Image (spheres, grey):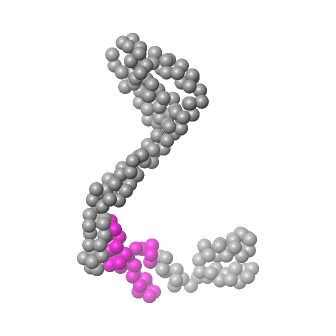
Amino acid sequence: MANPLEKQSVKKPTGWNTFYQQVAPGIIQKLGPEANIGKVSTVASKMWRQIGERRKEWKMKAQQTREDLDTEMVQEKLDCEKCGKIFTRSKDLKFHIKGCQQCVCEKCGQKFTHALQLKRHNLKKHSKTFSCKTCGKSFGYKHHLDRHSRVHDTSVFTCKICHTKVKTRSNFIRHMTRQHDGLDPKNY
């Protein structure tokens, strides 16, 4: 006879499912050849009702299992055999292993333990492809250039209450919050 457990698919474990999967093999063994999913479920549900307060333990165990499945967390620590770095998620270790190697920057000789670190280093230090049109300063990342460009921005936010001048809207909002008890910046 086929195993009644094989017919069930538990995608997200609940307290009942976790309990059932633990006790069902014993029930099947006791019932013998006439064991079917209906009989096994009936016996298991009677047991479930009888354990009372201990159901909370099963529910907590199932909750932990769901969280582990959702975040791909594992109980044991996984470490990279090449460099010894420790991971808690198997997918992070797999990604890390793809680029885990000793790398040396050809331009400055700096050493890295991962290919991605070397790539980031080259972009930031040696590939200054984004240049400021005002002062000529170069950056490896566009968002660094964008942040720098605010230095040259002549637009100014002036507080109508105390006449303080700031260069960015976020600083103006911070000023209104801290200096004027959070008055709405739209009105000033």
Asked if the magenta segment contains residue 12, the reply would be no
Asked if the magenta segment contains residue 126, the reply would be yes
Instruction: Tell me which residue sits at (41%, 85%) in the image.
Output: 137
Q: Is residue 115 left or right of residue 130?
A: left
Q: In the rendered image, is residue 101 in sight?
A: yes
Q: Quadrant of the N terminus?
A: top left
Q: Is residue 142 left or right of residue 99?
A: right
User: Can you give x and y, in whole percent of width and height, for residue 131 in the image?
Assistant: 40, 81
| 170 w.r.t. 27: above or below | below
Residue nearest the observer in this picture, 23 or 37: 23
Q: Is residue 70 left or right of residue 57?
A: left
User: Can you give x and y, in whole percent of width and height, for residue 153 in the image?
Assistant: 54, 83
Instruction: Tell me which residue sits at (31%, 69%) in the image.
Output: 112
Location of residue 158 by image quarter: bottom right
Instruction: Tell me which residue sits at (51%, 29%) in the image.
Output: 16
What span is in magenta? 116-145
User: Can you give x and y, in whole percent of width and height, for residue 101 in the image?
Assistant: 26, 63
User: Can you give x and y, in whole percent of width and height, for residue 122 in the image?
Assistant: 32, 74
Location of residue 144 by image quarter: bottom left
Give the mark count. 0
Q: In the rendered image, is residue 129 in sight?
A: no
